[in-house]
Image (tube, grey):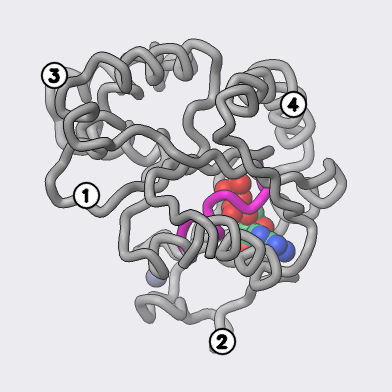
């Protein structure tokens, strides 16, 4: 038997399948998945001082400083409710975030004492033309956020969310051809440079993300060990 991992980051291009695989892993392992965007939106919704600062930055169309994101991630990582582990979906996304996250893992007494450091980085490798197809057809349940796709993953009953029965769905405003191309360019220049460090640290495992959802999930199962 191989190793088992429970402190996992999933990386890869936008539309690469991170959210989809994070949701599957989360269910199988009984641990939660967190995406940076989701944590920021939650903080804004909570209406805290930091939430208001975040909102002001986001509505101006600016990038939130990495410390806000890393601090939010830290709260989830050290939360006793997440003692069994965590899945980070699309984080760290920049060199800054990676460096602050690394410093936090070295310095935070709770993380060190409870051995909560990242132990696996899964890189979903998917070529651009796949990513474009996947993003253009993507939509989500308006209530629970479950992910669907016009071609690849329709709900079992058309128009009804498998997970919660809700009948309204939403699309992300940025899921269109024009933005996908620039998001891919961004991924290559800003996010991909994060990866070699994890390779050197021996944490990186590359997964061919081109197959159907269950085939990719099976590849991940073998690596993660469950
Ligand atoms: P990311 O979180 O990396 O942006 P998603 O998980 O949202 O990517 O996947 C993008 C879209 O492609 C979703 O609509 C999802 O249902 C679909 N999808 C994900 N993985 C696959 C796959 N292996 N094959 C086909 N479609 C997929
Ligand atoms: Zn739903």
Q: Position of residue 166 (x, y in %)?
A: 38, 75
Q: Which residues are magenta?
A: 14-23
What crowding class fits label 4: few (fewer than 14 Cα within 10 Å), some (14-19), or many (20 or more)? few
Q: Where residue 33 appears, x then y in whole percent?
A: 38, 50
Among numbered discs 3 and 4, the one appearing first in the sequence: 3
Q: CA distance from mark 1 to mark 4?
A: 35 Å
State the residue at coordinates (26%, 29%): 74
Q: CA distance from mark 1 to mark 3?
A: 25 Å
What residue is pinned by disc 4? 182
Q: Nearer the viewer, mark 1 or mark 4?
A: 1
Q: Nearer the viewer, residue 97 or 43?
A: 97
- Give the Cα separation between the discs numbered 2 and 1: 31 Å
Residue of label 3: 49
Kind of element beneath mark 4: helix
- Which residue is depicted at the point 16% across and 36% down? 46
Q: What residue do we see at 25% from left, 14% from top?
A: 107
Earlier residue among tags 4 and 2:
2
Within 10 Å of disc 2 (Cα), the crowding (few <14, some 14-19, many 20+) is few
Tell which residue pokes out farthest to the bottom in this image.
Answer: 157
Q: Secondary structure at mark 3?
A: helix
Of 72 and 220, nearer the camera is 220
Ligand 1: image quarter:
bottom right
Mark 2 Cβ and ligand 2 under 8 Å apart: no
Locate residue 192, reporting x and y percent. Answer: 68, 24
Q: Earlier in the sequence, mark 1 or mark 3?
A: 3
For residue 78, side relative to residue 176 (left or right): left
Query: Magenta includes 15?
Result: yes
Which mark identifies residue 156? 2
Marking on residue 82: 1
Q: Earlier in the sequence, mark 1 or mark 4?
A: 1
């Amino acid at each position: 038997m191989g190793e088992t991992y429970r402190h996992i980051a999933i990386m890869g291009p936008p539309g690469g399948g991170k959210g989809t695989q994070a949701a599957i892993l989360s269910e199988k392992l009984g641990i939660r998945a967190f995406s940076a965007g989701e944590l920021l939106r939650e903080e804004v919704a909570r209406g805290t001082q930091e939430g208001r600062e975040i909102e002001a930055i986001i509505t101006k169309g600016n990038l939130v400083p990495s410390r806000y994101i890393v601090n939010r991630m830290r709260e989830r990582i050290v939360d006793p409710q997440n003692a069994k582990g965590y899945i980070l979906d699309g984080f760290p996304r920049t060199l800054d975030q990676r460096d602050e996250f690394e410093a936090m893992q070295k310095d935070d007494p709770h993380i060190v004492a409870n051995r909560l450091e990242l132990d696996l980085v899964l890189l979903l490798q998917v070529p651009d033309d796949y990513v474009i197809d996947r993003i253009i057809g993507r939509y989500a349940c308006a209530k629970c956020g479950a992910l669907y796709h016009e071609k690849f993953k329709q709900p079992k009953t058309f128009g009804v969310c498998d997970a919660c029965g809700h009948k309204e769905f939403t699309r992300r405003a940025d899921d269109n051809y024009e933005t996908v191309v620039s998001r891919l360019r961004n991924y290559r220049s800003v996010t991909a440079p994060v990866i070699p460090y994890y390779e050197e640290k021996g944490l990186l495992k590359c997964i061919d993300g081109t197959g159907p959802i269950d085939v990719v999930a099976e590849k991940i199962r073998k690596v993660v060990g469950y």
